[in-house]
Each structure stands twice: as structure tokens, then as C-alpha cells.
Image (cartoon, helix red, strand yellow):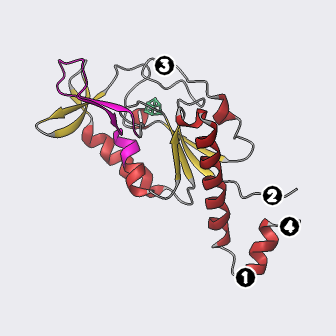
Amino acid sequence: MREFTRPNIVVSKCLGFAACRWNAEIIQADNIKKLEPYVNFIPVCPEVEIGLGIPRDPIQIVSMNGEEKLIQPASGNDLTEKMIKFTDLFLSSLDEIDGFILKSRSPSCGINDVKIYPSLETTDPISSNNSGFFGRRVLEIFPDLAINDECQLKDSKIRQDFLKKLFTRACFREGQKVNKIEDFVKRNFKNL
Ligand code: SF4
């Protein structure tokens, strides 16, 4: 049987890898776990990495004087700088990454459905289709990689596109290490 290069994927840790959500829960994500025999997962929880405990008071994105801030309303703590610093450090440390599976709706990990609030006192968001602080940098730095959230991957078409992109990317990444095209073909298409 043909052997595929194992893609390297960064994944939000709460998606089946650790009970690290703000309420100390874990999200059972069977469709992600099913990939485990075929890929290398790199789980990360940005909120824990910046020093927030488990459980913790939730955080949210608040628009203040035209700037988006990452705030923990219960404590009033502004976590914006800490999150930006961690995100840039972590993403710049990654080597040979092929994709990301991130948690939807999270003010940290979300990629397209995150709420922004106009003030700490308001419960009605001003918009609901934004990315979180970590997810946004992922999209900016790695625009060509396979990037989706766990909700998007429930759609079979999106899941297929994600997997195609992921394995193609891993295959070509591996191919760049091989000097001769014959070696590349031999390694990736053994049974042809
Ligand atoms: S969504 Fe991201 S920051 Fe929030 S618990 Fe999951 S991994 Fe941690």
C-alpha cells in the first residue's frame, strides 16, 4: 500500500487532547481523533500558555477606542500583549507545519466566527464573524496551509478539501528535501 508523508498539524488542545477550556471541559472531537494514526498532532492551548488557569473566567474581545483588546471581564485584565507575544513566539518556532485545526468561536483560537463586544458592560456583540488573536495570526502567517475549525470539518466537502490540501502539502514538503526527482517518486509512489 502507498505510504503517505505524515502531515504535521497544530490543533487547539481542547479539541480532544486536554480538559483546558475555561470551564475545565474537553471537547470530544471524534472526526479529529480519527486522524491520529495518519498525522502528527501538535496540541496547544494559547490561553493556558499565557498563564491563565483551568478553570478560569472567560475572556472576550472588546473594541476600545477603535482597537481590539483581549479582556477578562471578571478581573478586568487586559491580556492583549501577552497573547500577541506568545502567538508570535510560538508560530515562529514552528517547523514543517502543514495545517491547523482550531476551535471555533474562541476569542483566542477562532478563525472566522468570533464575537467582538463594544464594551465590557454590553452583552450584545458588534460583530460575530471575526478571528481570535491566535487564529488571526495563523491566517496571516500561513495563508497557504490547510486551516479549518472543528465545526467546518463536520462538512464532508470542507473535510475532503482540508485533507487533500494537508496531504499534498506534506508530500511536497518532503519532496523539497529530496535532491533527485527519481528519489522523490520512489519514496512517494513506491507501488507505481
Ligand atoms: S479554544 Fe484555544 S485557547 Fe480556548 S481552550 Fe481551546 S485551545 Fe485553549
Point out the stretch of residues depicted in magenta: 112-136
Instruction: Check disc 3: other Cα within 10 Å, few if <14, some if 14-19, many if 20+.
Output: few
Compared to 183, does 78 lie above or below?
above
> Which is closer to the viewer, label 3 or label 2?
2
Of the residues under marks 3 and 4, which one precedes in the sequence?
3
**Residue 177 located left or right of residue 50:** right
Amino acid marked by disc 4: Lys
Amino acid at the residue labelled 2? Glu
State the residue position of label 4.
190
Q: Is residue 82 above or below residue 74?
A: below
Examine the image and state in which quarter residue 18 appears. top right
The residue identified by callout 2 is 3
- Residue 142 as seen in the image, left or right of residue 67: right
The mark found on residue 180 in the picture is 1
Q: Tell whether 15 sits left or right of 3.
A: left
Secondary structure of the residue carrying tag 1 is: loop
Q: Residue at x 77, y 77 (%)?
A: 183
Q: How far apart are marks 3 and 2 (CA)?
A: 38 Å
Residue 63, given in percent of the width and then of the height, sits at 19, 33
Please tell me whether mark 4 sits on a helix, a strand or a loop. Answer: loop
| Alpha carbon distance from label 3 to label 4 | 46 Å
Q: Disc 3, disc 4: CB below 8 Å?
A: no
Residue at x 23% of width, y 28% of height: 126
Residue tagged by mark 3?
Answer: 24
Q: How far apart are the alpha carbons under marks 1 and 2? A: 19 Å
Q: Which mark is residue 135?
A: none
Q: Please say if the residues under marks 1 and 3 sit with CB atoms less than 8 Å apart.
A: no
Q: Position of residue 192 (x, y in %)?
A: 87, 68
